[in-house]
Image (cartoon, rainbow, N blue to C red):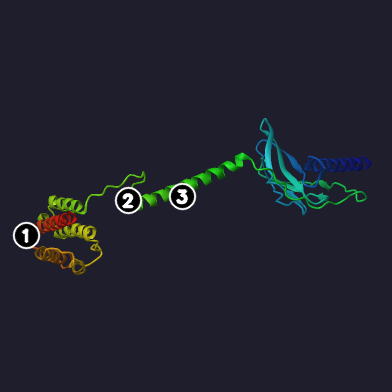
Amino acid sequence: MKKYLLLILWLTFGAVLCRAQDDSALRSRLSRDTILIGDQIEWTLDLQLAPGEGASLSKPGTEPVPGVEALGELAVDTLSMKNGRLDLRGHVTLTSFDSGSYVLPPLYVLKARSDGTIDTLVYAGPTLEVTTIPIDTATFQPYDIKGQIRYPLTFKEVIPWIGLALLIAALIWLLVRWIRFRRQNRNFFGKPVVKDPPHIVALRSLEKTRSQKLWQNGKQKQFYTQVTDALRQYIADRYDVSALEQTSAEMFRDLQDKEIDPALMEKMKELFTTADFVKFAKHTAADEENENAIPTAIRFVNETYMKQVEEEE
């Protein structure tokens, strides 16, 4: 009986010893146990997996305990792999900005055995000591906050601003030059802009309309629009009348004192009346009216131009 009692005590002691060894093995650790405020430290744990086993590690969060911060998430590295056995190491960087003693929380690992069972491994948390630099209050002399340090300006810093100022100055100069030359009827390089006389512009436009054969192809509205627009531009340039913005009646009213031949003026009125009916009343002009439109316009341009030449002589 005594022999059996000793055997039971021995087996119980061995089980407790093995359990203590297992518990002591499951401890996380720090790269060092003491840091200064603001320093960083590595918190690690080691894990071994046999072939066919898997594991899932808990994450300590951004603040494992109040006063301690985790700089990132828990990362796992493989240290070695032999015959299907894995040696893993989980690690996370910690820091603290408050002095004191901090007991880190335990880390949990769910370990899946090859037979399908799940074990929960608990890694005890270590203690982190955060210290600060001691201040000698007996000889310590406080100083006022220093002002902002001003460094001398370098040429490299000034170059972009000089370039910007030169660019703005160049743009202003180009704009002023363009405006001044435009008022003087010169191009950007200062050369006078030679404009064709109004009668040349009008005759060229009328000849272009004639060559397009618009009314012969059923495009009477476009035909009369081009003819009257050419005449309006000529009248505006020749007599300084706002013919492009006026109605036909307003335009002829302003032309009454321009010493234009009455018969020619009557022909022009007939041309513009026909054009207005075609453009705005969907009127279809007769072939005779279409044939006489451009000759009438050319006659008006030539006669008024020749009168201008006679007046200038």
Disc number lying in front (3 or 2): 2
Regarding mark 2 in the picture, which secondary structure is present there? loop
Identify the residue shown where x is 75% and y is 41%. 44
* Location of the N terminus (image quadrant): top right
Percent x, y of residue 253: 19, 69
Mark 3 to mark 2 CA distance (whole Å): 20 Å
Q: Which mark is residue 204?
A: none
**Residue labelled with disc 2:** 185
Mark 3 to mark 1 CA distance (whole Å): 58 Å
Mark 2 to mark 1 CA distance (whole Å): 43 Å
Of all residues shown, which one is farthest toward the front?
Answer: 313
* Label located before the other in sequence (3 or 1): 3
Disc number lying in front (2 or 1): 2
Q: Pointer 2: residues within 10 angstroms few (<14), some, or many (20+)?
A: some
Of all residues shown, which one is farthest toward the left?
Answer: 288
Give the amino acid at mark 2.
Asn
Identify the residue shown where x is 21% and y is 69%. 250
Percent x, y of residue 262: 11, 66
Identify the residue shown where x is 34% and y is 51%. 184
Percent x, y of residue 244: 24, 62
Residue contact between numbered discs 3 and 2, judged by CB atoms under 8 Å: no
Name the residue nearer the viewer: 44 or 39.
39
Give the amino acid at mark 3.
Ile
**Residue labelled with disc 3:** 172
Q: Pointer 1: residues within 10 angstroms few (<14), some, or many (20+)?
A: few
Percent x, y of residue 213: 12, 52
Of all residues shown, which one is farthest toward the top?
Answer: 83
Give the amino acid at mark 1.
Asp
Name the residue nearer the viewer: 205 or 53.
205
Residue contact between numbered discs 2 and 1, judged by CB atoms under 8 Å: no
Regarding mark 3 in the picture, which secondary structure is present there? helix
**Residue labelled with disc 1:** 287
